[in-house]
Image (cartoon, grey):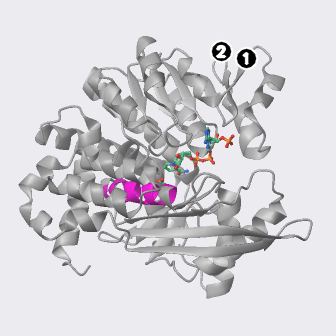
Amino acid sequence: MSILSEVLSNVKKRDPYEPEFHQAVEEVFESLEPVAKMHPEWVEAGVFQRIVEPERQIFFRVPWIDDNGKVQVNRGMRVQFNSAIGPYKGGLRFHPSVYPGIIKFLGFEQIFKNSLTGLPMGGGKGGSDFDPKGKSDREVMRFCQSFMLELSRHIGADTDVPAGDIGVGKREIGYMFGMYKKIKNEFTGVLTGKGLNYGGSLVRTQATGYGVCYFMEEALNNIKNKSFNDSIVVVSGSGNVAIYAAEKASQLGGKVVAMSDSKGYIYDSQGINLETMKKIKEVGRKRINEYLKYHPEAVYTEGSSNIWSVKCDIALPCATQNELDENAAKTLIENGCFAVGEGANMPCTPEAVHLFIKKNLVFAPGKASNAGGVATSGLEMSQNSMRYSWTFEEVDSKLKEIMKDIFKNTHETAKKYGFENNLVAGANIAGFVKVASAMYDQGIAY
Ligand SMILES: NC(=O)C1=CN([C@@H]2O[C@H](COP(=O)(O)OP(=O)(O)OC[C@H]3O[C@@H](n4cnc5c(N)ncnc54)[C@H](OP(=O)(O)O)[C@@H]3O)[C@@H](O)[C@H]2O)C=CC1
Ligand SMILES: O=C(O)CCC(=O)C(=O)O
C-alpha cells in the first residue's frame, strides 16, 4: 500500500462520517504520487499524515435570543488546519448544512488555495449551522455577537483571520468586527471583507468572481486559444461569487444567460440583467424568481441542478459543493461546453471532474480559480497593517497579476510532473509543495 493510500484509509477510518472531507483529501492525494516519490524525506517526516489532521478544532455553543424572546442555541466551530506558511485564514459559513465534515473539507482546500496565492496565509475555516435566511437584522446581529464572544478567544490579526463565505457577507462581518473590537479594545485587521468605511479593501466584494474570470481568460487563451468574448456563459448561484463572476464574464464579452439559487434558475436569452439581480439578492435578499417581475420575457425553472441543461460554451459553478455531477457534466459536454471554471469550493463531483479532463475541456479547479477572494483578503490584511488603502485600480491590477501567476504556476507544475494541461494536478501539487516544504523545515513537533 502506498503512503498516500494508507493515509487516506486512516482518514476514512478515523472520521467515518465526513464524506466531503474524504472527497477533498482523495482529490488532492490523487495528484501527489510523483511528489511522494520525489521527496522520500517528506514521507519519512510524516508530512502526509500530518497535513490531513487539523492543528486545532474548536467547537462552541452559540446561544442567542430571537425576536420573540425565545432562547436559541446553535453550534459554532473553527478549524485551524495549517499554519506552516502564515496565520490561519479562511471564511466563516452560516448555513443549516454546516457540520465538521463540511468545515474540514473547506479548511483543507484552503491550505492549498492560500499557498497558491503566493501570500503568507495558512488554512482555516469556520462557521455555524445558524441560518441567516428569514431572520431579522437584529436576530442576525445578536447571533453574530454571541458567536464572536467565544471566537474572539481563538483569533487575532497574527493568529487567525476569518472572512465571509456562504451566508456571511458585509452585514455579518460588521456585527462580528464590532463585537471583537469591544471585547479586545483594539482595532486590527482581524477579519477581512470589512466595510470600506472601517478598514475593508476595495475590490474584496468583487474579488472571488472577478478572479475566476481572470483565471479562466488566461487558461482559455493559453490552452485553447479562445476567450470569453462572444461566448455563452451559465453561472450557478446568485450570491457574492456568482454575481461578480457574471459581471466580469460580461465585461470580457461573454453573455450570461442563466443564474440560479437553491430553489431554481432563471434563463434570459437576452442576457441576465445584473443590476436587477443585485437588487433582488444583495438589497432585497429575495428568491431568484422575483426576476420575472422585472423581466417577464425570462423563464424560471424549479430545481437548481437543472441549470446545467442550458446550452453554453463556458460553465461557472459558483453556488456550493457537489452541485454539478457526472450526468450534468455529460449534458454540458453534449451541448458543446468547452470550459468549466469552479467559483464555488468543490462544486463538481470527482466523476464530473474526471470526465471534463478526459474530454479535454479547460477545467479550472476551485482552489486555483476562486483564490482571488482570499488573495484580496491578503491584500486587505497588508493595507490594514500599513494603515493605508490602495485605489480600486491598484487592488484590481494586483488581483489580476495574482490570478495570472496562479495560472502560470499550476500550468507549468502540471507539465513538470507529467500532467500537461491538467490544472487539477497542477494546483494540487503546486499548492502542496510549498506547504510541505515549510512543514518539513519547521520540524516534526510542528
Ligand atoms: N465569498 C467568497 O469570497 C468565496 C466563496 N467561495 C465559495 O463560493 C461558493 C458561494 O459562496 P458565496 O457566493 O460567498 O455565498 P453566498 O451566500 O453569497 O451565495 C451562495 C449562493 O449559492 C446558493 N446555494 C447555497 N447553497 C446551495 C445549495 N445547497 N444548493 C443550491 N444552491 C445553493 C445560494 O442560494 P440560496 O440563496 O437560495 O441559498 C446562493 O445563490 C461557496 O462554495 C463558497 O465556499 C470560494 C472562495 C471565496
Ligand atoms: O477571504 C478569505 O479569507 C476566505 C475566502 C474563502 O472562504 C475561500 O476562499 O473559500
Between the residue at mark 2 and the residue at mark 1, the CA separation in whole angstroms equals 8 Å
Outermost residue, right side:
68
Q: Is residue 114 magenta?
A: yes
Quickly name the residue at label 1.
298
First in sequence: mark 2 or mark 1? 2
Rendering coords of residue 222 (x, y %): 26, 28
Decide: is 349 above or below 427.
above
Q: Are marks 2 and 1 in contact (CB under 8 Å)?
A: yes
Q: Amino acid at mark 1?
A: Ala
Under tag 2, what secondary structure? loop
Instruction: Write down the quadrant of residue 228 in the picture.
Output: top left
Rendering coords of residue 120 (x, y %): 34, 66
Q: Which mark is residue 270?
A: 2
Please identify the dominant SS of the magenta region: helix
Residue found at x 56% / y 55% = 202
Disc 2: residue Cβ within 8 A of ligand 1's nearest atom = no
Which span of residues is magenta-colored? 102-115
Horizontal relation, residue 246 to residue 438: left or right: right
Horizontal relation, residue 6 to residue 261: left or right: left
Q: Amino acid at mark 2?
A: Gln
